[in-house]
Amino acid sequence: MIKLAIKSLLNRRASVLLTVIAIAVSVTLLLAVERTREQVQTNFANTVSGTDLIIGARTSQIQLLLSSVFHIGSMTNNMSWDAFNDIRSRPEVEWAVPISLGDSVGGLPVVATTEDYFKHFRYGSKQSLTFAAGDAFKGEKQVVLGAEAASKLNKKVGDNITIAHGSGGISFSEHDDHPLTVVGILKRTGTPVDQTILTSLTSLEVIHGGESHDKHDHGDSDAHPPAESISAALLGLKAKPLALRLQRQINTYKPEPLTALLPGMTLQELWKTLRVFEQALTVISSMVVLIGLLGMLTIMLASLRERRREMAVLRAVGAGPGTVFGLLVSEALLLTVVGAASGLALLYLLEWSLAGVIQSQTGIVLSFAWPTVAEWWRLGLVVATGFVLSLIPAWRAYRQSLADGLTVKV
Amino acid sequence: MTAVSVRDLSFSWKRNEPATLEIPEWQVQNGETLLLRGPSGSGKSTLLSLLAGINTPQKGELSLFDTPLSKLSGRQRDRFRADNIGYIFQQFNLLPYLSALDNALLACQFSSIRKERIAKAGETPEASAHNMLKRLGLSESQIQQPAHSLSVGQQQRVAAARALLGAPPLLIADEPTSALDAEHRDSFIQLLLELSAKNDTTVIFVTHDAALSRYFDSHVELNDLNKAGVTA
């Protein structure tokens, strides 16, 4: 009977092929959305690694994370250099990198920090930043560009840029008289670092030094510390388990109100807030699969009329209405299974052919893997839905062949 | 043994409607070839659907080879048809996407008894179908061709091969020659009867053309058989 189903399908290969393609593409979409989500989540969790604590002035943990790691939003308060110095000198702290935010170039955030940033900052699976060209800044008036920033601003090593105050695209005050030289360009990381312009705290102080804005107080140039206050700091600890205790101590720091966060945990929390979009995507791709299967249903129902003679012939040679029913169900199952399998193949083909492009454009590394259990479940659900939908034309064919018997009046 | 035995049969398509078919008594002997003639509307297709076991009479008895069809379940009647009845339609007998050979082999698809009968004759179903098609005048290449590429006459021959494959005791042909011209018609009937005779197959040949009666043992007018219109 399966042989009969296959031959019958081959006879209608044009519409059958279209149906299979529709199912395959929709299945590819369904799986691709899921895979992309997982990859994005992994990459998201990988934006910062190797950092045990992030500290800043008192604010919500998510806001501190957003501004210090993703450079989204701005910190309303700064923490003083004294506090930073105090925490840095604690015995459990192995390293501490200060960062100061608030300036921008062409809408891209400027991160003022120290050379230690290149030494200690890690992303992904503890990868450190590497240079595509040039090297880290050594002194004043030097900047290092993230990969994306370099291509957006169209700058290469040796070019000059000017920094504007404020983080908007259009700034009210540009520090035109203090051009900075690009000394290094980072390799792509797939993290917000790609978008940033890194410079030293002292460079920023020099730029701001001569000016007297009311609204900001990046400080005076006479102080020994490179800045009077900073936006946040990344901390590395000698022993990871100390992080929780130190976090509590910093959160209850007496001299000034501070917030400390564990990057991994806060990233998780942030991801949870994005779950709505993720679910919306899943719902949409499920709908697409349903549309693909409904297409199959339409084609099967439409073909029933012209297949009444076929059914009558089968009944004449002894097929019962149950056999007719089974024939249609197995046809639909065959279509969905082939469609789902092609969809899976298409997914791997796409991953294989686009992996290079995706990595260079977004930094997301696609890892080849067999379908996960969840993916098998999804495929199974697609086939099961196809099966359930096929009961409709099968039932109609059953009724039809009961009524028609051997005499088809078309 | 009688091939067909009918007693006090009454059938209507819908309940509480006057009967379409009422046959007080009718018998067809085993091995007999019979021409059943009736104008359209005389209950021809109704009688055929009862004989094929698609429907069962509301009243009375209908037995084929001493098997009362009304005692069988729907599934059993399907089996019975597969094993015992070869059926030829007026036209559109074949699955267009199968080859002539595969169409003929459909007869064995639902019947293990037909396969056994072929095996007893010392043949495989494929060889038997192949021989049958050759006897009916199809060429080697036509045998392998998909059915839709054959002419109407050739399609009817394939249908005949399918109906006769595995030597069913009863052959029902529902106006199988109405789409053929006179010359093809006569040779088709002769071949059909010749092949049936070999297996002692009972033939019920339905037609509206009384001129064909010379080929058959007996000639029955359905209007004489069916009392439905008379008594109502």
Image (cartoon, helix red, strand yellow):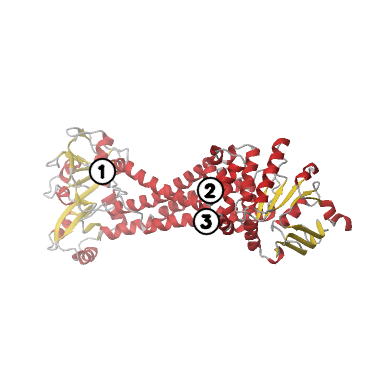
For residue A54, which quarter of the picture?
bottom left
User: Which chain's residue wears label 2?
Assistant: B
Query: Residue flagged by tag 3: what amino acid is it?
Result: Phe
Query: In the picture, which quadrant includes the C terminus of chain B?
Result: bottom right
Viewer-proximal residue, B64 or B194?
B194
- Number of the front mark, 1 or 3: 3
Query: Residue flagged by tag 2: what amino acid is it?
Result: Ala
Residue B179 visible in the snapshot: no
Q: Label 2 belongs to which residue?
A: B127
User: Which chain's residue wears label 1?
Assistant: A
Viewer-proximal residue, A101 or A369?
A369
Labels 2 & 1 near each other (Cβ < 8 A): no
Q: Label 3 belongs to which residue?
A: A387
Q: Pinpoint residue A126: horizontal percent, then vertical percent.
A: 20, 53
| Residue at (51, 45) in percent of width and height | A19
| Dot 2: element | helix
Question: CA separation, marks 2 and 3?
Answer: 38 Å
